[in-house]
Image: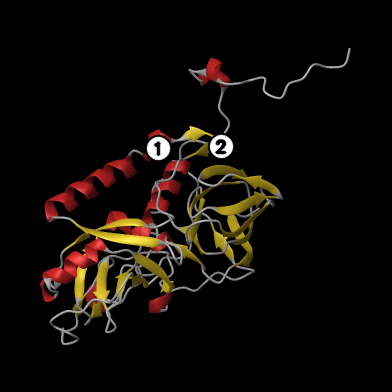
Amino acid sequence: MTRELIVHRAGPGVTVQDLGRPGYLAFGLSRGGAADRLALAEGAALLGQGADLAAVEMAGMGGEFEAGEDLRIALTGAPMRAAIDGARVAWNASHFLPSGARLSIGAVEAGSYGYLHLGGGLDCAPVLGARGAHLAAGIGAPLEPGARLPVGKDSGSGGTGMVLDPAPRFDGGTLRILPSLQTDFFDPAETRRFESIAFRRDTRGNRMGVRLLPDGDGFHSSAGLSVLSEVIVPGDVQITGDGTPYVLLSECQTTGGYPRIGTVLPVDLPRVAQAQAGATLRFRFVTLDEAVGIERQEQSHRAGLRKDLQPLIRDPRRIPDLLSYQLVSGVTAGDD
C-alpha cells in the first residue's frame, strides 16, 4: 500500500491548492492559492492540522478518488454530493476513507468551489515554496485521471466523524470595501451609487476574478482609461472600459491600468469566489480602522474553529436537553 490519493475522474477545474506564494509580486507572480482560503481553515480544523497543507480544490464539479491506504479526509467549501463506495457522506465534515475505497464527488449544490482535504495534506513537490497550481502563470495543471497524488504523514490530532457549521458565503451578500488611492477618480455621486445598488455575479469569472453586472448604468471615472499601470492585488475592484466592476481574486495579474474604486476586505473574498452566476452582491465602504478590527475578528474566528466542531453522531449521554427531544416518534405497538 502507498500513502497516496488516486484520481480516477476529475472535473475540468480540479487542482491542487494551498495558501499560495506570497512575495513574488515584483517578479510578476501573484499569490495564487485557494479561491476560498476560509475553506482551508475549516478543513484544517476538522482534521486537527495546519491550514498551510495542500488540498484538492474543485471548481463546480468534483471527481472520483481512491485511497492508496487508510486516510482521514474532510470536505469543505461549496457543498457537493459526496459518497464513499456508494454510501452518502456529509459535507463540512471529516470521514475515514479506507484503503481501496472510492470517494465520488458530484456537482456543487451551492457556491462554486469545494475542497477535499487529506490528513497530512497533499505532499506534491513544491514549486517556489508552494504546492498549489497557478494556472495563469503556467505552474501545475488541472488534475487528470490516472494521477497519483502523494499524501503526507498524518500527524493531526483527533479522529473523524466531526462536523462544522460553515460561515455563510454561498449565496452572495454584502462585501465590505476600503477606498483605494484611485477612489477619488470617481465623482462622490458615483461612489454613493456604487454602495446603493445591487450587482449580479456574471457568468464570466474564474480564479483570476469575477465580473459583476450593476443594476443600472456602469461607472465611470474622471481619469477614464489614462491611469498608469501599477500594482494590483486580490480584492481590488477594477472598473473596466464599459463601466463594469471586476473583483480580482487569487490568480489575478500583478499590474493593471483600469481605475480601482476600492478593495474588498480579505475576509469577504470567499463570498466573492463562492457566489454563483446570478447571485446578488452589494458593496459597503468601511474605514481603515473598521477594516483592521474586522480582519482581527476574523483571525480569532479562524483560530477558534476547532472549538465549534460537533460529532456527526451525538452521544445521548452528552446531550444536556435530551428530554426535550421526541424520542419515540413513529413508534407503534407491535402485534399481540
Q: Write the residue at 50% across / 57% down.
A: 114
The numbered disc on residue 161 is 2
Evaluate whether residue 175 shows in this view.
yes
Q: Write the residue at 12% across / 51% down.
A: 289
Amino acid under disc 2? Gly
Q: Tell me: residue 329, above or below residue 187.
A: above
Disc 1 marks which residue?
A: 306
The residues tagged by marks 2 and 1 sit, at their Cα atoms, a distance apart of 13 Å
Does the residue at mark 2 contact the one at mark 1 (Cβ under 8 Å)? no
Q: As drawn, is 134 to the left or to the right of 70?
A: left
* Residue with the most extreme right position: 336
Q: Write the residue at 49% across / 18% down.
A: 321
Where does the image place residue 298, in percent across and percent down from the top left?
28, 46
Question: Which numbered disc flags the more N-terminal residue, 2 or 1?
Answer: 2
Evaluate whether residue 34 shows in this view.
no
Q: Secondary structure at mark 1?
A: helix
| Frontmost residue, 121 versus 162 | 162
Q: Residue 108, located in which quarter of the rendered image?
A: bottom right
Q: Write the residue at 49% across / 55% down.
A: 78
- How many marks the image carries: the answer is 2
Q: Tell me: residue 272, above or below residue 220.
A: above
Q: As drawn, is 21 to the left or to the right of 98?
A: left
Specify few, some or many for label 1: CA neighbours under 10 Å numbering under 14, 14-19, or 20 or more: some
| Frontmost residue, 177 versus 198 | 198
Asked which colour scheme the image uses, the reply is secondary structure
Specify few, some or many for label 2: CA neighbours under 10 Å numbering under 14, 14-19, or 20 or more: many
Where does the image place residue 85, in percent across and percent down from the top left?
71, 50
